[in-house]
Image (spheres, rainbow, N blue to C red):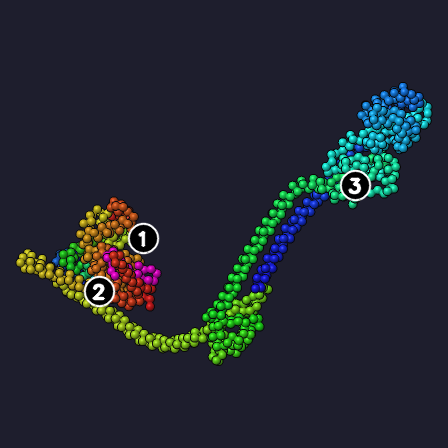
Amino acid sequence: MDNKNKDMRLRIILLIFSLLTVLSASTGGYLYYSSLKTAAFQEAERQTASHAKMIAKNLSFSLSENIKSVKTLAQMEELRVALTQRNDHTLARANAMLDHFNENLGTDVCYLMEPEGNTIASSNRADPDSFVGENFSFRPYFQKAIQGTPTTYLALGVTSGKRGVYYSHPVYGNGQRSPIGIVVIKASIGLIEKELPSFSNEIVLLVDPDGIIFISNYHDWLFRSLWKLSPKDISRISDSFQFGKGPWKWTGLKITEKEYVEGLSGRRYLMNRLPLNHYPGWSVVHLNNLEAISKMVSGPLIRITGPIVLTLCVFVGFAVFLLYRKASDEIVRRKLFEKALQESEKRYRSIYHNTPAMLHSVDTKGRLVSVSDNWLEMLGYEREEVIGEHLTRFFTEESCIRAENTIFPEFFKTGLCKDIPYRFVKKNGDTMDVMLSAIGDRDTDGNIARSLAVSIDVTDRNRAEEALRVAKEKLSRHSKELERQVEQRTKEISDILIQLRRLSGNIMASQEKERSAIARELHDELGQVLTALRIDSVWLKSRLKKTDEKAAGRVATMCDLIDNTIEDVRGLALRLRPGVLDNLGLVDALEWYTADFERRTGIACLFEHGDIPQIPETVSTAAYRITQEALTNVARHAVATRVFVILRNTGHILTLTAVDDGCGFNPNEVSELEALGLVGMRERAALVGGVLDVQSDAGGGTRVIFKVPIESNGKRAE
Amino acid sequence: MIKVLLADDHGIVRAGLRRLVEESEYIEVVAEAADGKEAIRKAHEIRPDVAVVDISMPGMDGLEVINQLRSIHPKLPIIILTMYEEEQYVVRAIEAGAMGYLTKRSAPEQLVKAIRRVYAGYRYLTDEASEMLALRVARGSTGKSLLDLLSMRELQVLRRLALGHTNREIAESYHISIKTVDTYRSRLLKKLDLRNNAELSRFAIQNRIIEA
C-alpha cells in the first residue's frame, strides 16, 4: 500500500515535471515570440513615424508650392498699373496676367485685391461665382498681406464653397513703401488630398491649431475636430469664416497614451503628429490602425516562429514523453524487482525457518534475533522463549565462557567463524554437541550487525568417534599383543628355519664333501688301479703279439674293456664333483664344464669371465652347482640354440649369469621337480650369503643371475 | 741312457710305468717317489735327466712340485702324467714349466716317445693341448687387447677359421655341432667388428694367433 502511494507520488512528480518542462518551453517560445513581436512593432512604429514624416513633408511641400509664384505675380507691372491707374485697359491687362498665371500654375483662381479688400481683377471673372467685386478683407491672408507680409492660408472658400490654399502677397507701387494692393493665388486642395495615401489602415489628417480637420483621406472626418471644442472656440471659428459654418463635430478620438488614440468604434490607432511648415499651429496627424500593424507584424512572425516553437514544443513533448515512458518502465521494473525481492525474502524466511538445520542469528550483544524451526525443535524450546535471550544462555558453562571470552570478540572482528565446537543445553537438560559456523551480516557501514549461524549436531558423531577411539585403542592393544605373539612365533619359526638352513647347509656341505671324497676315490684309487691294469694289459698285449695272437686278441679286448671302465669311472667322478673345481678353481671348472656341455648337448655354450680373484671353495661350489643346474634346465626344457655363462667380479660382488635364447617358462607353471631345482639353486645361493634371481618370459629365454658378495682378499663377506 | 725319475703315489701305477719305460733300451728309471716331497728330494739327490710326475699326489700339489723342481733344477725336463684329461690341466702344467703332458691312459703308447722328446729338448703335447697353450700365450702376451674379449673356445674357433678350416672340420675336431661353430663365428665377427673369414685371418695373423 505504502509502495503504491510512493509510486503514485513519483508518477505525479514526474507528470508535474513534464508539464513544467512543456510550460517552460512554451513560455520560452512565447517570450521569444513576444520579444520578436515587440521588436517588429517598434520597427513598424519607426516606419510609421518616418512614413508620417514623409507625408507631412509632402503636404508641407504641396502647400508651399505657390509661395514663389505669388511673389513673382505680385511684381508684375500689369497688376501695379491696374491698381494705380484703374481702368478697363489696365484691368484687362491685369486680368490677362492673372489668367496666364492661373493657367500655367494649374491653380483654382488668381485674383487681385485693392487695399480696401475688394477684388478688382480675377481669373474667374467670367464664372458665375466670380470674385470680382467681392470683398475679402475679413480674411487674415488679406489683412496680413496688406500690411506687407506674404501669407499662406487654408480655408473654405466663402464664394466657391471649395477648400483651398491661399497664397497672398502685397503688391507695391513704384517707390512706395506700403502695399497698394494684394494678389492672391488660390490652389485646390483636391489634388493634394488625392496624393495622400489611400484610406485603408492609415488616416492622414491636416489639422488647424484648434483641431479642425481640413484635409484628410478619410472624408467623413473633414471639418470635424480632433477633440471637443468649447462653445467659445466654436463661435470664434465661426466668426473667422475660415471653415464655413460648422458645426465641427468631435471625431470621437481619445488620446489614451501618448501616441495611441482610440476612435468611437473602439479602433486603436498609432498616432504621429507633426507640425506643418509655413502654417504655424497647423499640424499633420498620421493615424495608423494598430490591428493592421499587429496583423502585418505578427503574420510573418507567426509564420517564422510558429514552426520553430511548435517543433520545439513537439520535441520537448516527445522527449518528456520518452523520459516519462522510461521512468515508468523503470518504476515497473523496480516494482517487479521489489516484488521479487519481497518474494525472495519471503522464500528466504520460509527456507530459513523450514530448513532442517539449526540456524540462528544473534545481534551485536549476542542476543538471539531469529532461529529456525529446526533449532527450536532440536533444543525443545518455543520461539517466544528464546528470541531476545542471550545465546550463551543455551550453552553449557564451559561453552559459554569460551564463547564470551574468545569466539564472540573474534567473530565480531573478522565476521567469520568455522566449525566451533559448542555444547548446547536442551530444555530437558540434555546436552548436544554441535559444530557451529557463522558469517557476519554487515550493515551499510560495513559493521557486523548480526550473525548468520548454522549448527550441526555432532553429538552422535562425537559419541561414535569416542567409541571408535576406544575401539581403536582396544584393537591396538589387541594387535600389539598379537604382534608380540606373531613376533615370538616368527622368531621361533626363524630359529627353526635357521637351524634348518644350517642343517641344509651342513647336509649340502657334507654331501659335497662326500661327493668329493667319492669322486676322488673313484678317480684316483679305482682310476689308478685301472690305469695300472691298462698299462700292464697293453704291455701284455705287445708281448703276446709276437707269440700268441689269440691271447693278444683277448688282451686287446681286455684293454678296451679297461678303457671303457676308466671312461665310466671318470665320468662318474666328474658328475659327482669335477676335480678341476678343486684342483684348478671355478674359472677352469666352468670353462671345462661349458665346453663339455656344448659337446654333450650341441647347444653353443659361451663362457666369458673377467678377472676373478681367489674365491672360497663354498662359493665356487655354489656357483658351479648353480651353473650346472641352470644348464641342465636349458638342455632339458629351453629348446635353446645357445647359452651364455658369464662370470664377473664387479667390486665386491661376484656375479654369475646364465642366459639362454630358449623358450623361457612361466614361473607359476613349472613342475614340482623343476621347482625343486630352482629352490635348490636358491638354497645354494642363500647358503653362501648370495641371492639368486630367475627371470623368464615365455618365448623370451631365461636368465639366471647369482650374486654373492666376496672380499677382494678372497674371503666370503659375512 | 736317459735317467728317469718316476713320481706317483700309486705303487702299482709306478710299477706299470717302470715296466713300460724299461722296455726301452735307452731309458732307465733311476728313482721312484710316492709324493711330491720325495720326488723333490730324489731329484736333488739323484739328478735324473727327465722327471715324470703325477699331477695329483697327496701332500703337495703336482703343480707345486713342478715349481719347486724347476727352481732347483731349471734344466730338468718334466713330463706331467695324469689321470685328468681336461685340457685345463695341460695348460696349467705347461705354464708351471712342464715340458710334456700325458694322460695315464695314453702312457703305454706314448710315454717312451714323450721321454725321448723332452730329453731332446722338445715339448711333448697333444695337438689340442698345444693349441690351447698357444692361444693362452697369445692372449697373455698381448696384454690388454681385443683378445681379452674372447673366450678360450672362441679363440680356438678363431684360430681354426683363420687357418682355413671349414665349419664341419671345426665341429668335428671339437665334438660340437656345425651350428654351434657358426654361432661362435658370428660372435667373433661381431666382437671383433670384422666382416668375413678373410678379415678374421688377417686379424689372427696380426695378433700372432697363427703364423703368417
Residue pointed to by mark 2:
A671
**Residue A291 shown left or right of residue A2 in the figure:** right
Residues at marks 3 and 2, common chain?
yes
Q: Hey, which residue is sitting farthest bottom in the picture?
A: A429
Give the distance between the C-alpha atoms of the residues marked 2 and 1, in whole angstroms.
Answer: 48 Å
**Residue A692 seen:** yes
* Dot 3 amino acid type: Thr
Q: Which mark is residue A251?
A: 3
Query: Could you say which is closer to the camera, residue B9 or residue A608?
Result: A608
**Residue A288 shown left or right of residue A26 in the figure:** right
Tell me which residue sits at (15%, 61%) in the image.
A567
In this rendering, the label closer to the viewer, 2 or 1:
2
Chain where mark 2 sits: A
Residues at marks 2 and 1, common chain?
no
Q: Quadrant of the N terminus of chain A?
A: bottom right
**Element assignment for label 2:** loop
Query: Could you say which is closer to the camera, residue B33 or residue B126?
Result: B126
Q: How far across and down, in percent of the image, does residue A118 sit?
A: 90, 28
Q: Hey, which residue is sitting farthest top in the picture?
A: A89
What range of the chain is rendered magenta? A648-666
**Residue B157 seen:** no
